[in-house]
Image (cartoon, rainbow, N blue to C red):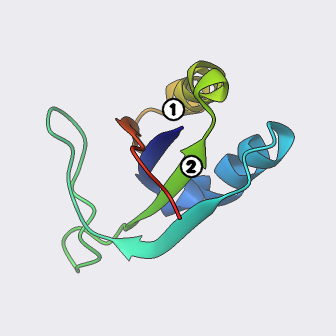
């Protein structure tokens, strides 16, 4: 199993959930408001007067066989509106209870 961490502009929430639903990716944890900025490009998302937008984050637990397709779909979503901001990272899940 893999853990896929997705940091994204809040505007993407419903679209990401729809991708997960259509691809039978069920288990996740969601953070509504997270702050940050991209490592290379894009505006900060601080929720402040100067930088009013915010990000959200999802940590989804995904079967190994689903990861590649899931990342492809997220990448396509990101390419549609790159200025919004969406990043995904994958970690191995060593054990669960």
Q: Which mark is residue 78?
A: 1
* Secondary structure state at the residue bearing disc 1: helix
CB of mark 2 within 8 Å of CB of mark 1? no
Q: Residue most toward the left?
A: 39
Quarter of the image for residue 20 reads top right
For the residue pair 38 and 25, the one nearer the viewer reads as: 25
Residue pictured at 22% horizontal, 60% vertical = 36
Reading the image, the residue beneath label 2 is 61
* Secondary structure state at the residue bearing disc 2: strand
Residue 4, horizontal then vertical, whole percent: 47, 43
* Residue 70 relative to residue 87: left or right: right
Residue 60, horizontal then vertical, whole percent: 55, 52
Q: Which mark is residue 96?
A: none
In the depicted structure, whether residue 26 falls above or below residue 80: below
Residue 30, horizontal then vertical, whole percent: 53, 69
For the residue pair 87 and 27, the one nearer the viewer reads as: 27
Q: How many marks?
A: 2
Q: Gap between marks 2 and 1, in whole Å?
A: 20 Å
* Residue 74 relative to residue 2: left or right: right
Q: Residue most toward the right?
A: 22
Residue pictured at 81% horizontal, 42% vertical = 24
Quarter of the image for residue 53 reads bottom left
Residue pictured at 46% horizontal, 72% vertical = 31
Q: Quadrant of the N terminus?
A: top right
Residue 15, horizontal then vertical, whole percent: 70, 49
Q: For mark 1, does the 10 Å Cα neighbourhood hold few (<14), some (14 to 19), or many (20 or more) residues?
A: some
Which numbered disc, 2 or 1, marks the residue that appears first in the sequence?
2
Q: For mark 2, does the 10 Å Cα neighbourhood hold few (<14), some (14 to 19), or many (20 or more) residues?
A: many
């Amino acid at each position: 199993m893999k853990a896929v961490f997705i940091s994204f502009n809040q505007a993407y929430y419903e679209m990401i959930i729809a991708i997960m639903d259509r691809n039978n990716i069920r288990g996740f944890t969601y953070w509504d408001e997270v702050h940050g900025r991209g490592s290379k490009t894009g505006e900060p998302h601080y929720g402040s007067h100067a930088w009013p937008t915010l990000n959200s984050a999802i940590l989804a637990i995904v079967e190994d066989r689903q990861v590649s397709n899931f990342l492809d779909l997220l990448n396509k979503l990101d390419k549609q509106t790159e200025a919004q901001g969406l990043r995904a990272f994958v970690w191995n899940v060593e054990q669960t209870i």
